[in-house]
Amino acid sequence: MTNDDATAAAQAAATAGSTGEQPTPRLTLRAGETGHAVTDTVWSQVGGTETFERIARAFYRGIREDEVLAPMYPQDDWEGATWRIQAFLEQYWGGPSAYQEERGHPRLRMRHAPFPVTPDAKERWLKHMHAALDEVELPPMHDAAFRDYIERAALAMVNRFE
């Protein structure tokens, strides 16, 4: 039994009900007989880095043309902005942790506090992100989850009211 298997068994035992029924052990798919755990994330299921780069680039094509949002970005750092949202989204959806390694904890509200994120700005941001998702065409289940997330995240960034 590996350490991961022992941990899973201990967790299952700790959560067993008082009815005396045996808990169902958690299964972990492994590469080979004793290999590392195989993880399957949204990031990998939708195409990994290539897909997230396409989302980020499509998103910023719209942002660059937006009269309200474009001025919030350094005009000489569009590639940096593209990398930041791509890396953040990749990490959020189970991909590489490059965002955290480079910039630390996302702290989205703090990072957006200096910018006037009004309800109008939020709606514009969402319009461009929805257009990017339309262009990329994620599988329906992942598309719905992604859109749900961006709606909630965008609402949480609003920090000024007109």
Image (spheres, helix red, strand yellow):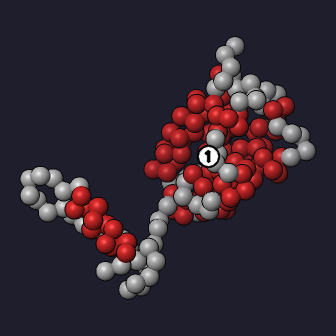
Residue 106 vertical position relative to residue 42 in the rendered view, above or below: above
Within 10 angstroms of label 1, few (less than 14), some, or many (20 or more) residues?
Answer: many
Q: Residue at x 54, y 58 (%)?
A: 94
Relative depth, front residue between 27 and 58? 27
Relative depth, front residue between 93 and 64? 93
Q: Residue at x 49, y 61 (%)?
A: 41
Location of mark 1 (residue): 133
Q: Position of residue 24 (x, y in %)?
A: 21, 63
Relative depth, front residue between 101 and 81? 101
Q: Is residue 120 visible?
A: no
Amino acid type, callout 1: Leu
In the image, taking residue 16 as reference, residue 127 lies left or right, namely: right
Relative depth, front residue between 19 and 132? 19
Element marked by disc 1: helix
- Residue 4 falls in which quadrant of the image? bottom left
The N terminus lies in which quarter of the figure? bottom left
